[in-house]
Amino acid sequence: MKKQIFLYFTALLFTSTISGQEIKDFFSTLAKNDLFYGSVLVSKSGENTFSNFYGYSNIDKKEKINEKSQFPIASVSKTFTAVAILQLKQKGKLKIDDPVQKYLLNFPYPNVSIRHLISNTSGLGQEYHLFDKAIKENPERIFSNEDIIPALIDNKVPLSFAPGDKWEYNNVNFCLAALIVEKIAGISFGDYMLKNVFIPAKMKDSFLPKNRKLKEPNQVELYTYPNFYSTDVVNVQTLKETFLIYEKSNFYGGGSIVSTALDLHKYQKALFSYQLLGKKELEEALTPTKLNNGKIASYRLGEKEIAYGLGWQIYTTDTNEKIVFHDGLITGLTSILMHNITKNNTVILLSNTANPVFVTANEVLKLIDKKPYKMPLQNLSRVYGSLLESGKKEKANELIGEYLKNPDTYEATERDFNRLGYQFLRLQKTDNSLLTFASAALIFPNSSNIYDSYGEALLQSGKKDDAIKMYQKSVELNPDNENGKKVLKELL
């Protein structure tokens, strides 16, 4: 989406405790820098503070995003599935530590409990290649939740770890949890959501599609960058999915709910005022899960340690405020519902151009709480890559030089440069790959990983002597780099 696309602002509300103009300026800057297009809702002390819409629901038709625009919310749906399970627990219909086999009789893993499912600690196999064989045998078939257990059995998929030993993000967990809801309630998961969540929370523009490939009139089109060096987005329908199952499935529970920012705010308010769950059940959902060894189930996201409860992610700020959230990502779509429990402040972002939302939501929470915040910046590797791809190598080098003098002008991460370098390498754009890794080494001179990657690119380019130097530098920076040591042994 080009910078020339103008912004569409509506429904701007603000309270006397915060400058509505400041929030408006924040998102205006993001949109001008191609860092956010979609729907925004910010709530302070439980009240709508700011609601705006940016860009187009359909670029080709010039249809603007508005308050009725509906977005797939991706993995934010997991919080809804956890709510359904906890509602049934609250009614005495199940116990969280019941084995899954009690409700899904053919489930082949006796030691996996419902808690393991909705805390992502089950050890179950992922869905990415689970159906590859079945798809090749029956290419016209669309697979759904009911097909997961037979696939696990047919493929004799072992658990990747003992239930409760580790934490691993897995959509299959929540798809099976949705099956349990259906088994106990005796109705479809979509009907359960409508009756027990959407209607009680007055969410009039939310639904679970029976076929996610068929869009409702108000659903937005999804757009994404086709490459790590692209600066213009394309409709995701023009791209091939990463995994076969994405094109041949209609799973629910781990994702698939379609909603609006306003409806998600209604959901958040109903949930945190105990209209959907009792206080005990909600607190259970928002309590970090403990692994078998007593440690918290968690992962690193940037500088933050994120714990996982039951369908919710949790962290504590430097000022000891409790933040709970869930984000979502599918091709062309990012979503996040982030709630500061301590301050009762909420940020909801739905982007149909897959803009990063976690960092943005965090900075908005700081902004509305009158704390120092950082404006998200353009991605250096993307701008740099686009210059290389268009043959403007001198300008690309100048850009790196300018960044090294003033690192506050762009966002630069080792991961982004590594991905860009490898993509150029896979596409046989060797010169661009080598230039990318060389620039990455300047920006991240203490990164063993970058030098290892640079060495691999040089080796594939037939530059053995230079590759040896890069691998040696990598091992020097990280003596535990076994791959680097192995390659050097083969080369020397």
Image (spheres, helix red, strand yellow):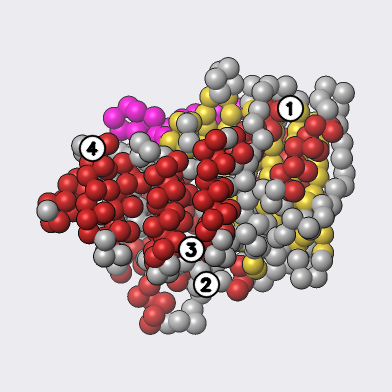
Label 1 Cα crowd, 10 Å radius (few <14 / some 14-19 / many 20+): many
Which element type, helix, strand or loop, lies under badge 4? helix
Label 3 Cα crowd, 10 Å radius (few <14 / some 14-19 / many 20+): some
Which is nearer the N-term, disc 4 or disc 1? 1
Which residue corresponds to the image point at 44% horizontal and 48% vertical from the top-left? 439
Which residue corresponds to the image point at 84% horizontal and 52% vertical from the top-left? 8
* Residue 82 at x, y percent in the picture: 54, 43
Residue 368: assigned label? 1
* Residue 104 at x, y percent in the picture: 41, 56
Image quadrant assignment for residue 6: bottom right
Residue type (three-letter) at the residue carrying disc 4 = Glu
24 or 401: nearer the viewer = 401
Question: What range of the chain is rendered magenta?
Answer: 279-299
- 124 left or right of 156? right
Nearer to us of marks 3 and 2 is 2
Residue 476: assigned label? 4
Which is nearer the N-term, disc 3 or disc 2? 3
Which is nearer the N-term, disc 2 or disc 4? 2
Which element type, helix, strand or loop, lies under badge 2? loop
Nearer to us of marks 2 and 4 is 4
Residue placed under numbered mark 3 in the picture: 145
- 371 left or right of 325? right
Observer able to see residue 284: no
Real-space Cα separation, disc 3 to disc 2, in angstroms:
23 Å
Q: Is residue 289 magenta?
A: yes
Real-space Cα separation, disc 2 to disc 4, in angstroms:
41 Å
Residue 240: assigned label? 2
